[in-house]
Image (cartoon, rainbow, N blue to C red):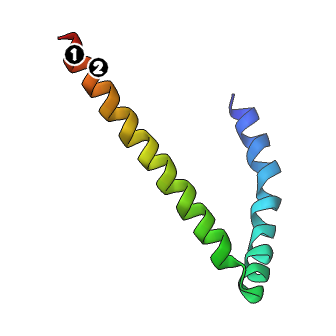
Amino acid sequence: MTRYLILLMCCLLPILCSAQESIDFLRSTGKIYSVVFTVVVLFLGIVLYVWRLDRRVARMEKENQ
């Protein structure tokens, strides 16, 4: 198990190191704001979905008692 974890980390390390260059490119072209906006919208959508789902489950539990 540890062997696979180390292998995975070794494979992902170069990708993470090159990510800094792409962030600098996005920042220099002004597109970083589009990326941040998209991530925020997706995060808020997931939070809203989980919140609504929790309310529905709570309502169903309340009806069953």
Quadrant containing the C terminus is: top left
Left or right position of 7 against 42: right
Mark 1 is surrounded, within 10 Å at the Cα level, by few (under 14), some (14 to 19) or many (20 or more) other residues, namely few
Left or right position of 18 against 1: right
Looking at the picture, which amino acid does disc 1 mark? Glu
Residue 57 figure quarter = top left
Residue at the spot x=80%, y=77% of the render? 21
Left or right position of 3 against 47: right
The image shows residue 48, relative to residue 59, as above or below, that is below
Label 1 sits on a secondary structure element that is helix
Q: Position of residue 34 (x, y in %)?
A: 66, 74
Q: Which residue is outermost to the bottom?
A: 28
Residue 2 vs residue 53, the one in the foreground: 53
Q: Position of residue 19 (x, y in %)?
A: 76, 68
Label 2 sits on a secondary structure element that is helix
Q: Which label sits on residue 63?
A: 1
Residue at the spot x=60%, y=70% of the render? 36
What residue is shown with label 2?
A: 60
Q: Which label sits on residue 28?
A: none
Residue at the spot x=67%, y=69% of the render? 35
Mark 2–mark 1 contact, CB under 8 Å? yes
Looking at the picture, which amino acid does disc 2 mark? Met
Q: Position of residue 18 (x, y in %)?
A: 81, 69
The image shows residue 58, relative to residue 29, as above or below, that is above
Residue at the spot x=73%, y=42% of the render? 6
